[in-house]
Image (tube, grey):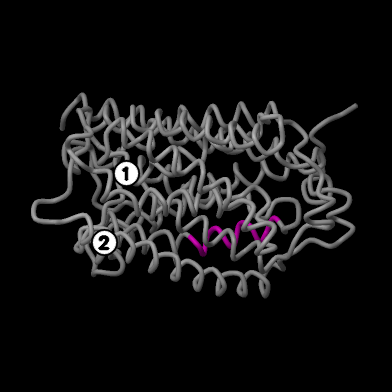
């Protein structure tokens, strides 16, 4: 065990949990109507609790224990065999499992943004549980657990494929099958608390240092380079979003600015351990532009009410960063370079395979999961419940008392 590495990953574990509680919870809560703020906070909190228990029970084992090319085994169900002196590299295995648990928490929580204000609470819980088993654990094993994509040499340092592509595609499928909010897109009410969105985005930005730099699983130069590349990408994409809004509408919005922040963070995630500072800036530029126009495409051309832009920002951003890694990994730019004997074109095909297969797997599995949820818990709230708001109809509380 290395004390410095252990200390940094202890810190990173706390930072990644901070991304969900309260970062993502506040980010999403500010974007919905006042009558639905508690429902979003409830979903984030409940998912964090449920995923923690399921990760302990079988998620970690299915993701990281020895199995086959497609899924891990059952040898570490309920964290069996993990003792105080068990190690993964230079870390206590208990810490490695906890660090990975925080990723398993935020990934299904990201999907909440696509179906806020119109889904039954029981459906959220059931879908999240099944999704961990059928989507997240297998893909994690493929990429990080020694599965078939790892064997092909796919580069996904902190979750462009594992986190963002899976969540983005699945979220869009759920939103499509759920149907749009009443009045979408013309008469959907604007965010009720932009200041809350900014606070949540700021917590996500800080927490993302644990997400990306922590994925080095060591206190070393790779972690430091990942941190600065992450920060520069977020800053660049934020400014890109600001400029586009200023040119198009004459006024840059706070919501737009922080949405750009998240787009930059999602885009740099898979590449953060491979590119250098310049690569971070270029990925922020690409992610800011591509994700901005992806929002319009998803909502206005595809007519999908992905309420808080999970596909456009996370799915498209994560895919963009994953696909651009081979071209920005040059050592001369502060990057780590590609594996010896591997060219950019060859690596791009591997990256594209990872993105495409993961997207298809996520979509098909999510359709099955939604069909199960419809049969077991029901899926969409009634029209009256949607009009009254989910805070009171599903939780018996209100976010604000006048």
Q: Is residue 30 above or below residue 206?
A: below
Q: Is residue 259 above or below residue 344?
A: above
The location of residue 308, given as percent across then percent down, is: 65, 47
- Assess whether mark 2 and mark 1 are in contact (beta carbons under 8 angstroms): no
Residue farthest toward the front in the current orientation of the protein: 247
Seen from the viewer's position, the closer of residues 391 and 107 is 107
Question: Element under label 1?
Answer: helix
Seen from the viewer's position, the closer of residues 175 and 44 is 175
Q: Write the residue at 39% across / 30% down.
A: 209
The location of residue 186, given as percent across then percent down, is: 82, 52
Labelled disc at residue 271: 1
Q: Write the residue at 38% across / 59% down.
A: 58
Q: For the residue carrying disc 2, how many other residues have a C-alpha within 10 Å: few (<14), some (14-19), or many (20+)?
A: some
- Is residue 352 shown in magenta? no
Q: Which residue is mark 2?
A: 75
Give the residues in magenta. Answer: 121-131
């Amino acid at each position: 065990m290395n004390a410095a590495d252990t200390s940094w990953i202890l810190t990173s574990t706390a930072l990644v949990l901070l991304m969900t509680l309260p970062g993502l919870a506040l980010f999403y809560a500010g974007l919905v109507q006042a009558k639905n703020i508690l429902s979003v906070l409830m979903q984030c909190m409940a998912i964090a609790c449920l995923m923690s228990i399921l990760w302990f029970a079988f998620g970690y084992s299915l993701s990281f224990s020895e199995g086959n090319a497609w899924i891990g085994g059952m040898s570490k169900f309920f964290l069996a065999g993990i003792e105080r002196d068990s190690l993964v590299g230079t870390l206590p295995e208990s810490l490695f499992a906890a660090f990975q648990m925080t990723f398993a928490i935020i990934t299904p929580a990201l999907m909440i943004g696509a179906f806020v204000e119109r889904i039954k609470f029981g459906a959220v819980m059931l879908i999240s549980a099944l999704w961990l088993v059928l989507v997240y654990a297998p893909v994690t094993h493929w990429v990080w657990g020694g599965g078939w994509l790892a064997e092909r040499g796919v580069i996904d340092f902190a979750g462009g494929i594992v986190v963002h592509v899976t969540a983005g595609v699945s979220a869009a499928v759920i939103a499509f099958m759920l149907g749009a909010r009443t009045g979408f897109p013309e008469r959907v009410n604007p965010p009720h608390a932009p200041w809350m969105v900014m606070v949540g985005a700021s917590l996500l930005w800080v927490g993302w240092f644990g997400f990306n730099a922590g994925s080095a699983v060591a206190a070393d130069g790779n972690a430091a380079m990942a941190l600065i590349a992450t920060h520069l990408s977020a800053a660049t994409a934020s400014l890109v979003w600001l400029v586009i809004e200023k040119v198009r509408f004459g006024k840059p919005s706070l919501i737009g600015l922080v949405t750009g922040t998240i787009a930059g963070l999602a885009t740099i995630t898979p590449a953060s351990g491979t590119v250098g500072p310049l690569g971070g800036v270029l990925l922020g530029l690409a992610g800011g532009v591509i994700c901005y126009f992806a929002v319009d495409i998803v909502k206005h051309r595809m007519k999908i009410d992905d309420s808080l832009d999970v596909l456009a920002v996370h799915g498209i951003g994560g895919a963009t960063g994953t696909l651009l890694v081979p071209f920005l990994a040059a050592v001369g730019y502060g990057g780590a370079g590609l594996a010896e004997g591997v060219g950019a074109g060859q690596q791009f095909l591997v990256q594209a395979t990872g993105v495409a297969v993961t997207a298809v797997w996520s979509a098909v599995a999510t359709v099955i999961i939604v069909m199960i949820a419809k049969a077991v818990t029901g899926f969409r709230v009634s029209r009256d419940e949607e009009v009254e708001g989910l805070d009171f109809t599903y939780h018996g509380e209100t976010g604000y008392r006048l």
